[in-house]
Image (tube, rainbow, N blue to C red):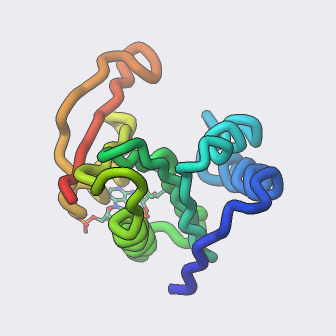
Amino acid sequence: MNTNLIELSDKQATAARLAEYELICFPANPWSADMVLGTLMTGFAYLVETEYGYALGRVSYEIAELLILGIFPEHRGKGMGKALLAEFIAETKRKHYTVPLEKIFLEAMADNTAALRLYTSAGFTEIYRRKDYYAVGSDGVIMELGL
Ligand SMILES: CC(C)(COP(=O)(O)OP(=O)(O)OC[C@H]1O[C@@H](n2cnc3c(N)ncnc32)[C@H](O)[C@@H]1OP(=O)(O)O)[C@@H](O)C(=O)NCCC(=O)NCCS
């Protein structure tokens, strides 16, 4: 896998590029360039970007969050999500700001079978369910991975 860790020096260009990826991977509810930029501006965001997909994370003290993970449609179902998630976890472990990282949190839609399988097989476990978070009948599943 050709993995490039992007230096977030050009945040506006990065945000515009990710907004395009969002339209491809999450056509029903994409993050806009402004939403991505707001996250990048915190200074604690990090991005793993490959030719197959991308993962955006953020660190807050001892907790990291996986905010977005998308594999481009033509590359799905071939183990690329697994590889990208492994790279995201490895990159997270390299982060150290004020205190050592202890956990990664993420949230997925309860009916996103592929995502839940991907995260479960990487060792994430469900810790909370937000009822009707995305829409009536569409819960949010919050998962964590200990580092
Ligand atoms: C979810 C997503 C990242 C998975 O990526 P992928 O490259 O297709 O996944 P992989 O091929 O690495 O497979 C990972 C696991 O998911 C399972 N899986 C993949 N696609 C699946 C599908 N359509 N239905 C059920 N399980 C699926 C695989 O069998 C594998 O499970 P295993 O570890 O138990 O063998 C990808 O489908 C995607 O980008 N979807 C749109 C964006 C999205 O929903 N992102 C997650 C937001 S929380």
> 2 and 63: which one is in front?
63
> 110 and 96: which one is in front?
96
Identify the residue shown where x is 46% and y is 18%.
Answer: 135
Please provide percent x and percent y for residue 55.
52, 59
Identify the residue shown where x is 68% and y is 61%.
Answer: 8
> 11 and 88: which one is in front?
11
Please provide percent x and percent y for residue 141.
29, 34
Count of number-bearing discs: 0
Q: Quadrant of residue 106?
A: top left
Please provide percent x and percent y for residue 144.
24, 45
Q: Is residue 70 visible?
A: no
Q: Is residue 82 left or right of residue 70?
A: left
Q: Is residue 37 left or right of residue 60?
A: right
Q: Quadrant of residue 26?
A: top right
> 108 and 45: which one is in front?
45
Q: Residue furthest bottom?
A: 1
Q: Is residue 127 visible?
A: yes
Identify the residue shown where x is 28% and y is 56%.
Answer: 100
Identify the residue shown where x is 38% and y is 35%.
Answer: 109
Q: Residue furthest front?
A: 98
Q: Is residue 58 above or below residue 76?
A: above
Q: Quadrant of residue 101?
A: bottom left
Q: In which quadrant will I find the C terminus?
A: bottom left
Q: Is residue 17 above or below residue 138?
A: below
Indicate which quadrant contains ligand 1.
bottom left
